[in-house]
Image (cartoon, rainbow, N blue to C red):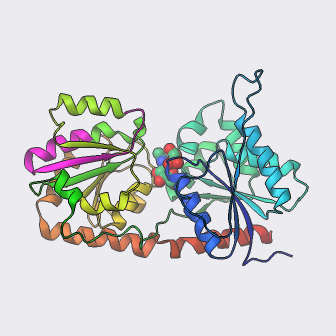
Amino acid sequence: MLDINSMKIGITCYPTYGGSGVIATELGKELALRGHEVHFISYALPFRLTKYVENIFFHEVEISNYPLFEFPLYSLSLSSKMIEVAESENLDLLHVHYAIPHATSAYLAKQIVKNKKLKIITTLHGTDITLVGLEPSFLPLVKFSIEQSDGVTAVSRFLKEKTITNYSIEKEIDVIPNFIDTDVFKKIPYDNCEFKKHIAPNGEKILVHTSNFRPVKRVTDTIRIFNIVQKEVPSKLILVGDGPDRYECEKLARELNLTDSIKFLGKQDGLVEILSASDLFLIPSQSESFGLAALEAMSCGLPVVSSSVGGLSELIKHNECGFIAEIGDIDRMAKYAIDLLTNDKKYDLFSKNARNRAVTNFDKSIVLPLYEQQYKNILDQ
Ligand code: GMT
């Protein structure tokens, strides 16, 4: 007999940097605090799982490197581990984040496990649907694995629509937005912030961008926006994160003579400190199904200037807690940034609106019950 107040949940996600892994881990931590038993199944400990939490267990997927296998068979190793954990821990459900390959591995595991009541829930996050999943070699597999999941959620209405149209899926998809702990992501009221003094010794405004520096993030646009802004407003740009485009970005910063004004911090853990010291968040992405990084900034009271793609307009209310412009419209985004950074009254209002929006719409206390309800609905089927 299922105890809905104490479910046994397996969670699979990408454990390294990335919004889907952050959401999966924070979800698991919260579920554990609410009395559920949570088993993370992945190839490494999720990076946000930094300390012991009662009710949380980690199961590492070992990857066989037999010489005949020229390429690691991760999807199969993952399925095997899912089967092992589902059987030994008597899991009620497997919740996988990011469809490729997790939803497919979970499907396979479900066919093999002895517990025929095991349910699979897939949460779609972004490029699993909008980019990689559309590659001809993946598309049929992604479609099949989504359709075979017992429950499917998407992090925005945009992503739900894209899934339905791009994959001709008729299955019910529930939108459950990403969430944040607004008690943690909260502006630290610095009187004398060393970090700020170091980055902006003359009281310059600080613009900030965090991402994994993939082409889809258009980090070079961030630099070009800043280049226009700094000609009008004494300012600095902080770039947090690392990835394939970092070299190109550093090159661009040198070409534009901005090396003294742009700080490449690389991957950082102290995001709340960095956001608290900053004034404005830039996210000019090519594609963004939700924009968790923007939500983190808003929760710390930062207005956001973004492109008008994907789910960003579901998060950022244009002309209330930030501004939205066409992809690649660097001039307009710079104009919006200058407007906010030179108008204290407007800035304060947008900053308050950004924080309020995070607290009233996306706090974990609002979104977590939606996931719990989703689990209950699926297990009741
Ligand atoms: O889809 C990706 O590119 C990776 C994924 C991730 O793991 O960071 O990002 C997506 O999921 C995040 C969490 O739901 C969203 O906040 C991001 O907007 C989304 N990225 C894209 O759509 C490009």
* Count of picture labels: 0
- Residue 159 visible in the displayed image: no
User: 348 left or right of 266?
Assistant: left
Task: Please state the horizontal and vertical placement of residue 198, each as a whole percent of the image.
Answer: 18, 53
Residue drawn 72% across the image and 41% down it: 62
- The image position of residue 249, as x and y in percent, is 30, 33
374 to the left or right of 106: left
Quadrant location of residue 68? top right
- Does residue 312 belong to the magenta stretch? no
Q: Looking at the rendering, in which quadrant would you find the N terminus? A: bottom right
Q: Which residues are magenta?
A: 223-245
Q: Position of residue 230 (x, y in %)?
A: 13, 46
The residue lying toward the viewer, choosing from 197 and 293, is: 197
Q: Residue at x 76, y 38 (%)?
A: 76
Task: Classify 344 as above or below 107.
Answer: below
Quadrant (top left/top right/bottom left/bottom right) for the C terminus: bottom right
Question: Is 237 included in the stretch rendered in magenta?
Answer: yes
**Residue 77 visible in image:** yes
Nearest the camera: 37 or 319?
37
Q: Residue at x 28, y 51 (%)?
A: 208
At 62% across and 64% down in the image, what residue appears? 28
